[in-house]
Amino acid sequence: MSFSLPSRNSLFILGLLTLVLAFAPCAHAVEPLDTFSVRVSGYVTSFDTEIRADGEGRRGTDIDLHRDLGLGDDNLVANVGLTWRPWEKHEFALSYYTQSADATRQINRDIEFDGTHYEASSTIRTDVDIDAYEASYTWWAASHDQWALGPRVGLVWYRMELGIKLDVDVGGNQGGGAASSRVSADVPAPMIGAGWRWTPSDDWRLSADVGYFTVSVDDIDGDIYFGRAGVEWFPWERTGFTLDYTYTRIEADADKDSFSGNVDFKDAGLRLGFVYRF
């Protein structure tokens, strides 16, 4: 999968970093691990998704949301997260973000979606809403003055709602909602992996988390891949800035009342944000 950052977002990030560097005061020493932290960031996310929604006894069409339906794959959304380490080697983390998109496109092939047939050359309106909830626990088995390493377990829960409605049929007539369909899919993505933190200097911290899992729960079978790498800079004792890249991929087959079919979901993005720690 390729990921390209839109130019306006690149300029925004570059400008913000330049401003921070120009006016930042002297830095303070930062440890590899925090007792508590809160992060608020802008998340430039690219969701590259293929989905197949089967109808009653009818197999659906494999649809690429960007290529087939015109849904933009790059969005700037807000992300909020926190970590808490109540004991020396035990850390808990939570984060959340939501995003939505819509598009109208004339399709160039027949599409079967959730038992409804849409003919080639008709114009359809599509909307998608995605909520992502993440929780994790890390046991920092190796914790030293400048670095920490330990096993990590986590769960990212994606709630996706996708609707398709006929706007104009092949004859040029207004669809009037004569053909429409909507599916809602809850996709749990558990992960087992590791976390790593390193402070190469007093005011900088590097971090990375990785995970993988094969899941077969609640009528869902799939594979989950997760990775995140980032850098944090603390010009002040308790506050600083963070920049990281996150990648999640879920390949899953589902057979549920609300959704039956297949999802190949890739959620990747660059986050620039503010962190408060102690």
Image (cartoon, rainbow, N blue to C red):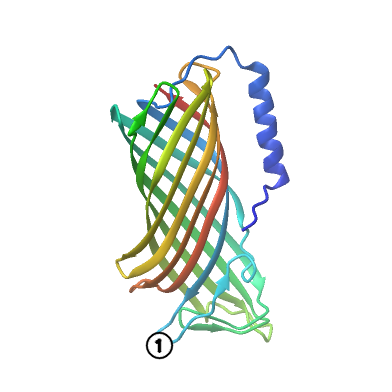
Residue appearing at x 42%, y 45% in the figure: 96
Look at 45% across and 42% down and name the residue there: 209
Q: Is residue 165 above or below residue 186?
A: below
Image vertical order of residue 61 relative to residue 7, above or below = below
| Horizontal side of residue 259 vs 201, given as left or right | left
Q: Specify the amino acid type for callout 1.
A: Gly
The residue under the point 29% across, 27% down is 88
The quadrant of the image that shows the N terminus is: bottom right
> Under tag 1, what secondary structure?
loop
Apparent side of residue 16 relative to residue 160 in the rendered image (left or right) = right
Snapshot quadrant of residue 144: top left
Judged from this view, the residue extending furthest toward the left is 87
What x and y, as percent, mark residue 61? 53, 79
Quadrant where the C terminus sits is top left
Q: Examine the rendered structure and indicate whether residue 66 appears above or below residue 81.
A: below
Task: State the residue in front, 164 or 188.
Answer: 188
- The x, y position of residue 151, in whole percent, is 35, 42
Which residue is nearer to you in this view: 3 or 39?
3
User: x and y percent of residue 122 in the render?
Assistant: 65, 80
Q: Which residue is mark 1?
A: 57
- Using the image, determine if residue 36 lies above or below residue 235: below
